[in-house]
Amino acid sequence: MTELGNRLKEAREAKDYSLDDLQRITKIQKRYLIGIEEGNYDAMPGKFYVRAFIKQYCEAVGLPPEVIFEEHKDEIPTTYEDEIPISLSRVQSRKSVPESSTKVFDFLPKLLIALFVIGALIALWVFWQGKVGDKAPESNQTENQTQVDVDENKSAEGEKPEDETKDKEQTEEPKPSEDQKNGEDTSQPEQSLEAVDSSDYKTTYELNNAKEFKLELSAKGDTWVKVFNTDEQVLFEGLLKQGSKKDFDLSDDKQAYLIIGDASNTDISVNGKQLEYKISATDVVRQDIIINYVPHSEQ
């Protein structure tokens, strides 16, 4: 490692920069930064890049580039010989434009104008043909209108048109069912799941107008849960991993008691409908959920 490399490395470590940090700051590949610290410039694209990379390195670690170049001029390449042939070749390639290409560029605007004129003439011709075509069938339209009037008169005297028959069928009111005649209401109220009491970390819900009580717990992340039935029998106790589910059929019970270890990672569904936490799941992580179920037959 050279004296310059040691000095740059010490400045980098004083800034508490790793080589990966310096790579993000300077946008210089890590292997080039290592080459600068080790004094190995053979891997660089050219001598010009050696000086440019060292300058960026100095600026990133807080060293003055001019002073570094002056104090370590014996270690840093100073010539640009490997860049000169590339620059010269670029100049020559720009000057040597063939005369044939110049003629093509001169002819191109004329060609574009000619194509534009031809396109405009074609558009006018198509427009004129359309006008002539619109005028031609006027006599046939008069004959067709007379035929339509005759057909309408026939339909008025004879059978009614099909559209009129359909309209009449649609306007006829449906006959009431036997249950409606007897005054019975066959409609059923929708299932409801409402919070009736809430305090601290405990919330009580009531499930009404439901013929069954099916419970599903879904884990969005790791969460510990415990489930009791009406008889305080433990139906499940344990950790649910992310993506796992637990199903319970509590249709023969009247209550479910849930202890949720992490409410923010636990979704609760009752008969396919997701339960909304009355207490914010992000504010209160551990929650007790009580669901009272009254079977539909008892309501």
Image (cartoon, rainbow, N blue to C red):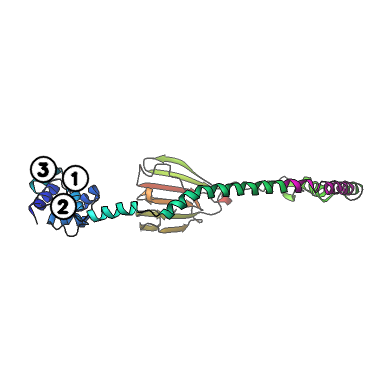
Q: Is residue 198 left or right of residue 179?
A: left
- CA separation in Å, label 3 and label 2: 19 Å
Measured from the top left, where is residue 298 in percent x and y?
57, 49
Q: Magenta residues?
A: 130-152
Give the residue displayed 41% in from the left and 47% down from the top.
289
Residue in the foreground of this view, choosing between 297 and 188: 188
Q: Is residue 256 left or right of residue 3?
A: right
| In the image, residue 138 lies in the stretch drawn in magenta | yes
| Residue 203 visible, this orientation | yes
Evaluate if marks 1 and 3 touch, with contact meaning CB atoms under 8 Å apart: no
Measured from the top left, where is residue 293 in percent x and y?
50, 49
| Residue 228 visible, this orientation | no
Q: Residues within 10 Å of mark 3 (few under 14, many from 20)?
A: few
Which of the two discs, 3 and 2, sits closer to the camera?
2
- CA separation in Å, label 1 and label 3: 15 Å
Evaluate if marks 1 and 2 touch, with contact meaning CB atoms under 8 Å apart: no
Q: In the rendered structure, which disc, 1 or 2, sits on the residue that comes first in sequence? A: 1
What label sits on residue 60 in the rendered view?
1
